[in-house]
Amino acid sequence: MQRRDARSNRARILDVAQRVLADNPDATINDVAAAAGVVRRTVYAHFASREALIDGIALEAADSISAALGRVPAADESAVTVFVRQTLALTRVGDQYRLLLAVARTDLGHNGIHNLLGPMREAAAAVIRRGQREGVFSSYQAAEVLILNIEAIALSILDATNAGLLSDPAGAATTSSLVLLGIAPDDAERIVADVRAFDSSARAR
C-alpha cells in the first residue's frame, strides 16, 4: 500500500511540476510543492534536487513527444505533408513540448534537455531540408536555424493559448510555421485544413 501511495505521489508531483515549470521555467521546489499540495520534504523524498525533478519530467515529456512523432507516417508523403503532421502531433502534446522548449531556453547548461530535443530537431530539420531540395520550402536560412525559429513560434502560440488568446494552437502553430518556411498564408491555411480533413476521414474508416 505504501509503495503504491509513493508511486501515486511521484506521478502527481511530476504531473504538477510539468505544468508549473511550463508556465514558469524558474519555478522552485517550493513552488512545485505548493501547487501539488504537499510539503517540500515530500518532493525531495522522490527527487533529490530541482535538476533531478526536471530530468524526470523531461524524460516523460520526451517519451510522449517521441510517441506522438512515431505515429506520423512518412512514407510516400510530400515534405509539406510530413511537416504538417509532425507539427500537429507536437502541439497535441503541447504542455510537454512547451516545457522542454521553455526549460531549454532558460537553462542552457542543462545538457540533458538539449540531448532530448536533439533527435526531434534533427527529424524536423531533415524534412525541411527535403522540402528545400524539392523547392517547396524557402532556403533563405539553414534548416537548423529555421527549426529554432519554428520552436519560438510554437512556444509563443502555446503561451497565448494558455492565456486564453487562441483556441486552436495546433492549427495556428502549423500554419505560422509553414508561412515561416515560405508558403503563402492562405495556402498554408488550406494545406493544414486539407491534411486534417484527410486524416480525420482516414481515422473514421
Image (tube, rainbow, N blue to C red):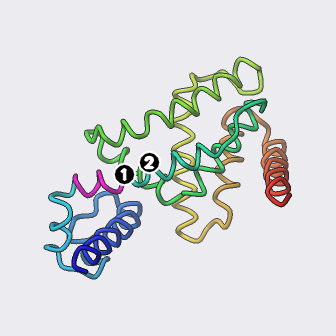
Residue 164 relative to residue 137: left or right: left
Residue 3 relative to residue 153: left or right: left
**Residue extent of the magenta highlight:** 51-58
Query: Which residue is rendered at x = 69% and y = 44% of the image?
Result: 85
Residue 25 on image: x %, y %: 33, 57
Q: Quadrant of residue 5?
A: bottom left
Nearer to us in this view, 18 or 107: 18
Query: Which residue is rendered at x = 71% and y = 47% of the image?
Result: 175
Nearer to us in this view, 7 or 199: 7
Q: Main secondary structure of the magenta part?
A: helix
Q: Is residue 57 magenta?
A: yes
Residue sitting farthest toward the top: 133
Estimate how packed mark 1 is, as few (under 14), some (14 to 19) or many (20 or more) residues with alpha carbons within 10 Å: many
Question: Label 1: which residue?
Answer: 58
- Of the 4 image quadrants, the one containing the N terminus is bottom left
Residue sitting farthest toward the front: 1
- Of the 4 image quadrants, the one containing the C terminus is bottom right
Q: Is residue 11 above or below residue 112?
A: below
Query: Which residue is rendered at x = 78% and y = 30% of the image?
Result: 76
Alpha-carbon span between mark 2 and mark 1: 6 Å
**Which amino acid is tagged 1?**
Ala
Residue 53 relative to residue 73: left or right: left
Residues at discs 2 and 1 in contact (Cβ within 8 Å): yes
Q: Secondary structure at mark 2?
A: helix
Number of disc labels = 2
Question: Label 2: which residue?
Answer: 62
Residue 177 on image: x %, y %: 65, 42
**Which amino acid is tagged 2?**
Ala
Estimate how packed mark 2 is, as few (under 14), some (14 to 19) or many (20 or more) residues with alpha carbons within 10 Å: some
Q: Is residue 6 above or below residue 93?
A: below
Residue 164 on image: x %, y %: 58, 71
